Amino acid sequence: MNLKLFKKKQISVKNQKKRENSVFFIWVFLLTLFAYPIIKTLIDLNILLSTGRLIGTDDWLNLTISHQEKIAANVLSDQRKILIVSGSNALFGLSAKQISQTTGIKAINLASHAGLGGEYILSRSQKLINQGDIVLLPLEYPFYSSPGISYDFNEYMVLSKFIISYDPKSLSKISPISFLTFVLENACSWPNYSEYQNFFRGDLSRKVIDKRLQQQRILFGCYSGLTLNEYGDETCNIGKDDAPTLPTISVTALPHSLGKIDPGGYLKTFIEVAREKGAILIPLYPVSTRTDDYQNPSFQASAQTIKTFWEEQNIPFLDSLENSLLAPELMYDTNYHPKDNGRKKRTQIIIDLINQQLNY
């Protein structure tokens, strides 16, 4: 009888130890899971501080946008102006200077980088719109199918880096789920030194950042934020019309299918705000490289989908896909960036559309 009790006690002790071991390993797992993002962030910060922060897209974009918005803000509120709002297809591809000189209306190029996403770009432009202003919208194609800023925050590193580095107030616009997804993806990604260096500004002063942007301008010409004219146009592609045609410009920009247009409703919200302010909207196709693909019925259907969307908002869409496409030799370094001759050609077409709209 005593032997049986002894064996039962032994089994009970073993089971207790197993339970204790299981609880211990569960706690270790949970603590590791919780601590890993913190530890990884500390490692990333150590890499950052030991190697020195690189200058990234967010830096030259901040300089670019600050310069452009300052120009627009300096126009008197009762003075009509033309605002160009989009990603870089218009930064390189439309000339606010040419529009100003031809129409006699002050034009400002607010175009920046499509990686900032459509909702963010449009929301920044809203505060600069006044009664009677004309807003040109050569929006890049992905803007039409984006659900909005929370989606773009995870989809585009450019937007997340820019907001974290230069516009942290806009983090309040990001949904908690989207931000948590971003944190987890960042924590579980393999370290990429230049990527993490761009997420943290470290102890670099504005003076140091500006100095490095000056160096970038000297080394690369473009993408420094220091080559804009007094209208906000990018000028680094001026004088490059004889440059060889690069393979990077040959990609077809328009997708076969855009899916549902404006699924998150941010385009319609912008339209409502612009109307309340008494602005005239002129939607356009983004300038891009002419390729044989655009003859395909599916591409033509996608282009028609965009036109239909604007017409359903009772906004005339006077542009044509044909007029938005430039020959490869007129393009600069991507399928959205023309050389200066290409910009002049596309801008003249836009000027004609502005005159049509004003007489519509």
Image (cartoon, helix red, strand yellow):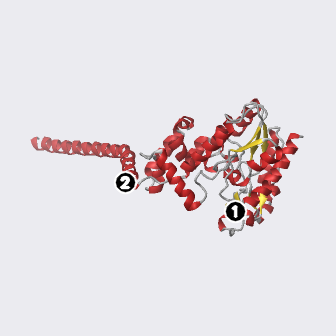
Q: Amino acid at mark 2?
A: Ser
Mark closer to the observer (1, 2): 1
Q: Mark 1 — residue?
A: 239
Residue depicted at 40% across the width and 46% down the height:
37
Q: Residue at x 54, y 54 (%)?
A: 214
Callout 2: 10 Å neighbours few (<14), some, many (20+)? few
Task: Report the quarter where the C terminus lies.
Answer: top right
Cα separation, mark 1 vs mark 2, equals 40 Å
Q: Is residue 111 left or right of residue 353?
A: left
Pick whichever, 213 or 278, lies toward us: 213
User: Where is residue 136 drawn, in percent x and y?
Assistant: 76, 44
Q: Is disc 2 placed on a helix, strand or loop?
A: helix
Name the amino acid, label 1: Gly
Q: Tell which residue pokes out farthest to the right in this image.
A: 359
The structure residue drawn at horizontal position 36% and vertical position 51%, both measured from the top left corner, is 46
Task: Please give the label number shown on residue 50.
Answer: 2
Q: Badge 1 local density, few (<14 within 10 Å), some, or many (20+)?
A: few
User: Would residue 342 be found to the left or right of residue 218 on screen?
Assistant: right
